[in-house]
Amino acid sequence: MENPGIEESEEIAEESEEIAEEVEVAREMAGPEGASAIARTPGMPQAPRRDGNTVYVGKKSTMGYVLAVVTQFNNGAEEVCVKARGKLISRAVDVAEIVRHRFMPNSKVKDIAISTEELMSEDGSKNKVSSIEIKIQK
């Protein structure tokens, strides 16, 4: 009987290698123009939503958000904020940990802020949702 944690770690390692290859291809394609060339490249997948140096974690794969954070750092950002709400908080923590331990071992978690947000549902009632902001520093 195999340990499911080991299988998951192996999958994450494979995804990490694939993302690292994609980052190298993107760097080569960008050339001296940087990220603006990547954004104009037809066929390139759209990056997760970002405002400045903030990555909003949603339902895409964890490694997609890891790539977004690493890309922000490679484009000169000194600090990147990873934000998530509700059930996606654990994915945001995974993103921060993968960035810190696999891609940028010298980076540090500068700050973690947790809060509760009130959202209006479609029927007009208010729902409270937990949220997290993880600031990672180069």
Image: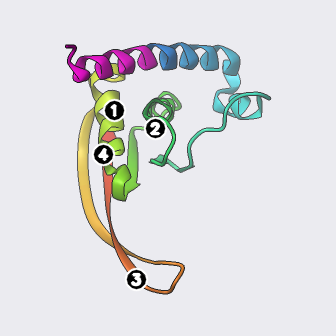
Mark 4 Cα-neighbour bin, 10 Å: few <14, some 14–19, many ≥20: some
Spatial distance from mark 1 to mark 4, Cα to Cα? 22 Å
Q: Main secondary structure of the magenta part?
A: helix
Mark 1 Cα-neighbour bin, 10 Å: few <14, some 14–19, many ≥20: some
* 20 relative to 34 in the view: left or right: left
Mark 2 or mark 4: which is in front?
4
Task: Look at the numbered disc 4 and give the secondary structure of its residue.
Answer: helix
The numbered mark, 1 or 3, whose residue comes first in the sequence reads 3
* Relative height, residue 100 to residue 82 (above, below): above
Badge number at residue 138 = 1
* Relative height, residue 110 to residue 10 (above, below): below
Which residue corresponds to mark 4?
A: 90
Which residue corresponds to mark 3?
A: 126
Are dots 1 and 2 in contact, CB under 8 Å? yes
The numbered mark, 3 or 2, whose residue comes first in the sequence reads 2
Spatial distance from mark 2 to mark 4, Cα to Cα? 24 Å
User: Hey, what amino acid is under mark 1?
Assistant: Lys
Task: Look at the numbered disc 2 and give the secondary structure of its residue.
Answer: loop
Which residue corresponds to mark 2?
A: 77
Q: What stretch is highlighted in magenta?
A: 1-16
